[in-house]
Amino acid sequence: MGVFDDLVGQDQAVAVLSRAAAAAREVVEGGRGAGMTHAWLFTGPPGTGREDAARAFTAALLCPDGGCGHCDQCHQVMIGSHPDLEAVRPQGLSYGVKQTRELILRAAGAPTQGRWRVILFEDADRATESAQNAVLKAIEEPPPRTVWLLCSPAPDDMMITIRSRCRVITLTTPRTQAVAHMLATRDSVPEPMAQFAARAAQGHIGRARSLALDEGARSRREAVLSIPKALTGVGECITAAERLVKTAEEEAAAATATLNESETAELRKIYGEGSTGKGLNRGLVRGGAGALKELEDRQKSRATRIKRDSLDAALLELVAYYRDVLAMQFGARVELANDDLRFDLDQQARGGTPEETLRRIDAIMLCRERLEANVNPQIAVEAMMLSLRRG
């Protein structure tokens, strides 16, 4: 089983990457290696596996057998411990130029095992403009045997000058049957559950796996999709907004609490807190307070990002719900993402017009834009709930 076998429904991308990996082996052996380049941009809708594809390509570059999937090289790449792989994923809302320059310095070294030095930059679209300019300089004049793999939802998320210097790999949303087959064969999910999860996730592989394996994820989905029929008054709209925002805050707190504590303890240890001996005190040494403040800012940014991502996931669930309502209003013969809620969908479809449904979808998308623009989440979600009620 090769490293590309885990990419669901991406046959075209796999073909391109496989040919490039073969060309890369030619370069290592002293050949020309036509088809291999030093900069790649992996794009595609959320959940299609951009990062998985980039990591599989990394394994194919660093594995002597082109990504066999079972050797030490492949295993080290997949768990992120390979010495020639520098993987970075922005934890906060953005990735600054200082961090990018540090990454470029780390990328400048020669490969330790003689093949390639790979820089895998997940969520590269979160890099600030200054950071992207720094990346541009790095890929314009890369060190020998250095490969940059950038990941972003769409090519337009990156500067045009970066796009023009990268080979773009576009991943597509996999079909429901392909995702269901993956769940059934790789995760031993019963067929009915696999079909439900694949359909509800709309091709988002990570979301499908979560729905199939985590009862808590299914409960959260049910809570979000119960909102439309609960918006019977202004008070109910405010309550629904509070509940949605509070749930996102709780998820962010749960996801970051342990990590924050360990990071803070490690930093305090580095700066000497609790040390004893001649010339030492039990407090932070000079510079420690500033470093601690910088860490706290990063942790706060990370929590805000997780909260925003949680809210955005809930809003996309609502978009899918109203898309199904619209499909039923028009009598469209399409697969319903929320087919398990067909009775509720039918009631919503009969109780309104397509124009009202479209306005509700627009209200959700506007809420997403406001959250991206740092509008107070409670205010943005309350406004959306009121719009959903009015139609």
Image (tube, rainbow, N blue to C red):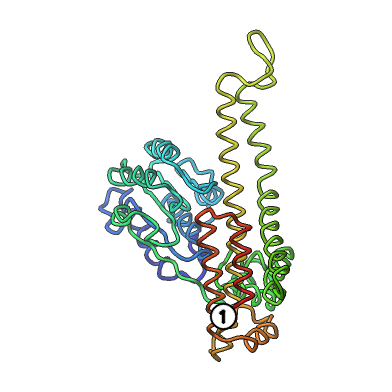
**Mark 1 secondary-structure assignment:** helix
Q: Is residue 64 above or below residue 288?
A: below
**Residue located 69% across and 14% down the image:** 276
- Indicate the quadrant containing the C terminus: top left, top right, bottom left or bottom right: bottom right
> Can residue 65 be seen from the camera position used here?
no
Q: In this view, does 208 lie above or below 27?
A: below
Q: Residue furthest top?
A: 278
Q: Where is residue 326 in the image (x, y as percent from the top left)?
A: 56, 83
**Residue located 53% across and 79% down the image:** 358
Please name the residue that numbered disc 1 is placed on: 357
Task: Name the foreground residue: 33 vs 193.
Answer: 193
Q: In this view, does 220 lie to the left or right of 147?
A: right
Q: Position of residue 351 (x, y in %)?
A: 65, 87
Q: Which amino acid does label 1 sit on?
A: Thr
Task: Name the foreground residue: 133 vs 235.
Answer: 235
Task: Name the foreground residue: 167 vs 7.
Answer: 167
> Can residue 385 be seen from the camera position used here?
yes
Q: Where is residue 313 in the image (x, y as percent from the top left)?
A: 60, 63
**Residue located 56% across and 69% down the image:** 364
Task: Name the foreground residue: 75 vs 46.
Answer: 46
Q: Where is residue 206 in the image (x, y as percent from the top left)?
A: 59, 63
Q: Is residue 359 left or right of residue 277?
A: left
Q: Residue furthest bottom?
A: 331
- Quadrant of the image occupied by residue 289: top right
**Residue located 43% across and 51% down the image:** 64
Q: In this view, does 176 lie to the left or right of 112?
A: right
Q: Residue furthest front?
A: 234
